[in-house]
Image (tube, helix red, strand yellow):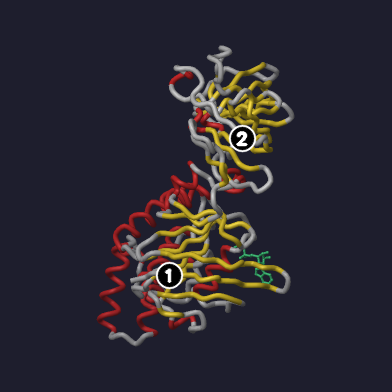
């Protein structure tokens, strides 16, 4: 078992609140990724759970037992560091077997377990080498092996791939995923890399300023970001976020900005059937309109009434190999549009972009929280609750 519960977990450094009252329930067997920009409190949170630093408030429970003040060695959690922290003078076999020898297990048993773990991590041929005779990826696997051999209730991993080059990061990522599927052990994994988070996690916990912004599956976090912060963190390039105004015009709700005209209430292909649902009582308010670069497409027609339209001028086009990204000035903002190469666009060219309404996101400009709306309802817009 390896269920980890955090209850109001807090850590202050003087006036800095590094971790600010985090409540989180990590189920046994989850691969939970703590994601956020540098300085948001990820490492501090992991260290609090590992017991390397004490909290200034709140509790940590492991399978229901309060371990807030237990010594790290008594927590049955195995930590894997970015720096690998291997013993340079010991062979791979002795590095991996170290925790079992320290626990004074019989030699034959240690040997057998080391062989099993080395097999799992494809380190069998390297057992007699020392860390300096290994590549970065191999060292990382030894560090993981040393964690696995303890058969802990959970693995705590702090940016374990960040010292590897891009190609190795990708293959090691795939190995981590397979390993988690085979072992089924809870993993708590810290990274600032969205690709790692999206590809590895069963759930992502997004942190900003020591607080949880959103907790959800990678799909939920990517497709329904709970705030401007989450929306602008994920994606490559990240979501376009345009300040706009939500208006009720003749009973139809529209999002408007310089160069932007989006009627929210036309649904169905090309607005067939005319305006869907008129609504009353929607207050005009300041919003942020979000649309991902890959969800935009060129449209050369004015389109049927109500087609979401963004009009701008191409500023630059960047070649990404298979795709291109065009920077387009829309009103006073710059919007990124990504699509298969060639987009057929040149700087200075006027463009008209559109997007499926399902791919448009709205956020309240003041709170930054996601606004949910449904066509044909009296209350089309309400604020999503905070995570
Ligand atoms: P992350 O891992 O997301 O980059 P950290 O957990 O390392 O973030 O840091 C969170 C915040 O706490 C930052 O503002 C950082 O400066 C501060 N902090 C971390 N460790 C210490 C420390 N030992 N003393 C003072 N401030 C710290």
Asked if 284 appears above or below 120 in the picture, the reply is above
The residue shown at (74%, 29%) is 332
Image quadrant holding the N terminus, namely: bottom left
Residue 248: % across, % down: 63, 29
Other residues around mark 2 within 10 Å, as few (<14) / some (14–19) / many (≥20): some
Residue 7 in sight in this render = yes
The residue shown at (49%, 66%) is 132
Residue 13: % across, % down: 68, 73
Do tag 1 and tag 2 residues touch (Cβ < 8 Å)? no
Find ligand 1 in the image and state its quadrant. Answer: bottom right
Q: Which residue is mark 1?
A: 4
Asked if 300 appears above or below 73 in the picture, the reply is above
The part of the image, by quadrant, that contains residue 107 is bottom left
Asked whether 41 or 143 is in front, the reply is: 41
Measured Cα–Cα span from mark 1 to mark 2: 43 Å
The residue shown at (58%, 31%) is 280
Residue farthest toward the top in the current orientation of the protein: 301
- Whether the residue carrying mark 1 lies under 8 Å from ligand 1 is answered with no
The residue shown at (48%, 31%) is 376
Mark 1 lies on a secondary structure that is strand
Asked if 47 appears above or below 214 in the picture, the reply is below
Mark drawn on residue 110: none
Of circles 1 and 2, the one toward us is 2
Other residues around mark 1 within 10 Å, as few (<14) / some (14–19) / many (≥20): many
Residue 128 in sight in this render = no
Residue 271: % across, % down: 48, 19
Please state if 119 lies on the left or on the right of 19 as rendered.
left
Residue 7: % across, % down: 51, 71
Mark drawn on residue 282: 2
Please state if 223 lies on the left or on the right of 291 as rendered.
left
Mark 2 lies on a secondary structure that is loop
């Amino acid at each position: 078992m390896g269920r980890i519960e955090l209850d109001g977990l807090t850590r202050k450094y003087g006036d800095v609140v590094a971790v600010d009252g985090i409540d989180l329930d990590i189920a046994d067997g989850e691969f939970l990724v703590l994601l956020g920009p540098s300085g948001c409190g990820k490492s501090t949170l992991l260290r609090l759970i590992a017991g390397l630093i004490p909290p200034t408030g709140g509790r940590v429970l492991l399978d229901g037992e309060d371990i807030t003040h237990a010594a790290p060695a008594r927590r049955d959690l195995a930590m894997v560091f970015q720096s690998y922290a291997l013993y340079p003078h010991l062979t791979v076999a002795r590095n991996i077997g170290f925790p079992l020898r320290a626990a004074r297990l019989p030699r034959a048993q240690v040997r057998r377990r080391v062989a099993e773990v080395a097999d799992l991590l494809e380190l069998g041929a390297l057992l007699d080498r020392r860390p300096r005779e290994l590549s970065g990826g191999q060292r990382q696997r030894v560090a993981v092996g040393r964690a696995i051999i303890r058969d802990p209730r959970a693995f705590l991993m702090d940016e374990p791939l960040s010292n590897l080059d891009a190609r190795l990061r990708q293959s090691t990522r795939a190995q981590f995923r397979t390993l988690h599927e085979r072992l089924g052990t809870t993993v708590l994994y810290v990274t600032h890399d969205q690709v790692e988070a999206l590809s590895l996690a069963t759930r992502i916990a997004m942190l900003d300023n020591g607080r949880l912004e959103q907790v959800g599956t990678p799909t939920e976090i990517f497709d329904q970001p709970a705030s401007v912060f989450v929306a602008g963190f994920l994606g490559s390039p990240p979501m376009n976020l345009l300040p706009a105004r939500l208006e009720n015009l003749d009973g139809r709700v529209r999002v408007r900005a310089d160069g932007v005209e989006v009627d929210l209430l036309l649904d169905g292909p090309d607005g067939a059937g005319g305006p869907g649902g008129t609504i009353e009582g929607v207050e005009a308010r300041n919003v942020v309109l979000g649309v991902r670069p890959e969800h935009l497409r060129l449209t050369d027609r004015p389109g049927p009434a109500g087609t979401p339209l963004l009009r701008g001028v191409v500023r630059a086009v960047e070649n990404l190999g298979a795709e291109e990204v065009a920077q387009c000035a829309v009103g006073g903002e710059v919007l990124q549009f990504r699509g298969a190469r060639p987009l057929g666009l040149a700087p200075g060219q006027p463009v008209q972009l559109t997007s499926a309404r399902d791919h448009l996101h709205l956020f309240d400009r003041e709170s930054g929280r996601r606004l949910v709306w449904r066509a044909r309802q009296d209350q089309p817009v309400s604020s999503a609750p905070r995570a």
